[in-house]
Amino acid sequence: MSGKTANVPGGPAIEVRENCSLRCEDCTLVGAIGLRADGNGTTELVGGSIEATETALVVGGNARVELSDNRIEAPVGVVGGANGKVSIRGGALTGKRFAITLSSNAKVSVGPGAKVTGPLKPGRKGSIEGLER
């Protein structure tokens, strides 16, 4: 999918679940939650933005999300749990309350050129790698 806007004010703009895959280039996700991924779902967001009123990304259940050169703004940027994995390359992630909050073996990898702004909460058994502050 390319150049699309998903606007769902009361819920997730997009859900990726149950072994599904999604690649979205230069898309805009707007909602209470920008993206919810679980159940072994895989998502790749290249360019574009997420504007959420609650949480930009909720990732768990062995889901994997790859972000490349995105602009993400929300009160909470990433909530990860249950072996969810998020990779951030380039772009900007801003969480006013928390940029990243993790639990239950969730992992966030921050790569070159990515700017993460906001408090971090790795939690029990969660890990944030590559973040230079």
Image (cartoon, rainbow, N blue to C red):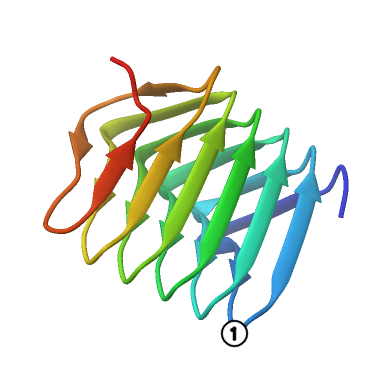
Front-most of residues 109 and 12: 109
Residue 20's quadrant in the figure?
Answer: bottom right
Q: Position of residue 7 (x, y in %)?
A: 66, 53
Pick out the residue farthest to the right. 2
Residue at 47 percent across and 50 percent down: it is 86
Vertical side of 111 occupied by 11: above or below? below
Identify the residue under disc 1: 18
Vertical side of 25 occupied by 96: above or below? above
Q: Is residue 84 left or right of residue 5?
A: left
Pick out the residue farthest to the front. 130
Vertical side of 82 occupied by 98: above or below? above
Residue at 17 percent across and 58 percent down: it is 125
Residue at 51 percent across and 81 percent down: it is 39
Vertical side of 36 occupied by 20: above or below? below
The quadrant the C terminus occupies is top left
Residue 80's quadrant in the figure?
Answer: bottom left
Q: Is residue 107 left or right of residue 110?
A: left
Pick out the residue farthest to the bottom. 18
Residue at 58 percent across and 24 percent down: it is 91
Q: Is residue 35 left or right of residue 131?
A: right
